[in-house]
Image: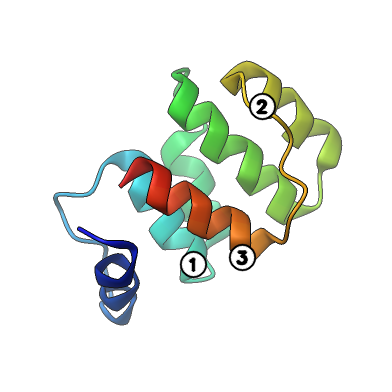
Amino acid sequence: MTILEFKVTLNQSNPPSDLSVQLQALWWDAKGNWKQAHDLIDHLNDNISAHIHAYLHRVEGDLWNARYWYNRAKQPEFNGTLQKEWEDLVERYI
């Protein structure tokens, strides 16, 4: 799947069933459902989930918490726009 194909699925009411939980979280975030996105990864401890978790707290505006999760993910804090980070994350983990 490409990022363009991923974006096309945003016209659906639910994410494709074959998406990883991390990509499902990004899908729900793109649909404006931050809580659903956060609930999917909040309890996970792997580095990819931590990276998505960091982004979601950045979306929320909680930069302290976002920095904590970037550190847990072993990733640098993202300095671009939220849209650019979302696209980078989708492309990285697709």
Residue 7, numbered circle: none
The image shows residue 80 at horizontal and vertical percentages of 74, 55
Residue 83, numbered circle: 3
Residue 69, numbered circle: 2
Q: Are marks 1 and 3 in contact (CB under 8 Å)?
A: no
Circle 1 packing at 10 Å, graded few (<14), some (14-19), many (20+), is some
When asked about the image quadrant of residue 77, the answer is top right
In which quadrant is the N terminus drawn? bottom left
Residue at point 46%, 30% (across, down): 49
Dot 2: what SS?
helix
Identify the amino acid type marked 1: Ala
Residue at point 35%, 72% (across, down): 7
Q: CA distance from mark 1 to mark 3?
A: 9 Å
Residue at point 35%, 48% (across, down): 23
The image shows residue 72 at horizontal and vertical percentages of 63, 17
The image shows residue 61 at horizontal and vertical percentages of 81, 52
Position above or below: 13 against 72: below
Q: Are marks 1 and 2 in contact (CB under 8 Å)?
A: no
Q: Is residue 20 left or right of residue 93?
A: left
In the picture of the structure, the residue carrying the numbered disc 1 is 30
Q: CA distance from mark 1 to mark 2?
A: 20 Å
Dot 1: what SS?
helix
Q: CA distance from mark 3 to mark 2?
A: 19 Å
